[in-house]
Amino acid sequence: MSESESLFGDEHVRRYQETGGRVGHIWRRGTTILLLTTTGRKSGEKRTVPLIYVTDGDHYAIVASKGGAPEHPGWYLNLEKTPEVELQVKDEVFRARARVATGEERARLWRKANEAWPDYDQYATKTDREIPVVVLERI
């Protein structure tokens, strides 16, 4: 397993930031990772997490799966309150606005995300919630 494949959590964020994504952008099974920085809904502090993404034209799409847990991940709850976020994709850092995909757009992006990480379909069977697909648009 390469260094990138073994990365997880805070260590993934640290190595990604140190190397401009040379380490950490390509992850397990060839998935691509971005860094999402949200504003804590309670603390107001910046929180950064590594997430699998797919592209959709000029936008990025991420999935709030939390492995199929019954509750949404903290980063998703943060962007519900403050949808303006910061992204790092490879060595580029920029502001973006998050919105939840619905209807046909959600279905299309869910399929695309599943092509990148087939476990999403399995995660969906573990929970009663509809797992959100979030679109990130550069601002």
Image (cartoon, rainbow, N blue to C red):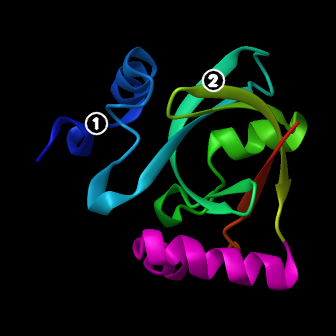
Q: Name the residue rendered at 36%, 36% in the picture.
A: 24
Q: Where is residue 20 in the image (x, y as percent from the top left)?
A: 45, 23
Say whether residue 56 is magenta: no
- Few, some or many C-alpha atoms within 10 Å of disc 1 (few <14, some 14-19, many ≥20)? some
Secondary structure under the numbered disc 1 in the rendered image: loop
Q: Where is residue 48 in the image (x, y as percent from the top left)?
A: 58, 27
Mark with earlier residue (2, 1)? 1
Q: Nearer the viewer, mark 2 or mark 1?
A: 1
Q: Answer yes or no: is residue 130 visible.
A: yes
Q: Mark 2 points at which residue?
A: 47
What range of the chain is rendered magenta? 102-128
Alpha-carbon span between mark 2 and mark 1: 18 Å
Q: Name the residue rendered at 72%, 65% in the picture.
A: 132
Please indicate whether residue 64 sits to the left or right of residue 16 in the image: right
Can you say whether 47 is above or below 90 in the image? above
Q: Name the residue rendered at 80%, 40% in the picture.
A: 79
Can you say whether 112 is above or below 57 in the image? below
Residue type highlighted by circle 1: Leu
Q: Answer yes or no: is residue 126 visible.
A: no
Q: Mark 1 points at which residue?
A: 7
Residue type highlighted by circle 2: Arg
Secondary structure under the numbered disc 2 in the rendered image: strand
Can you say whether 42 is above or below 78 in the image? above
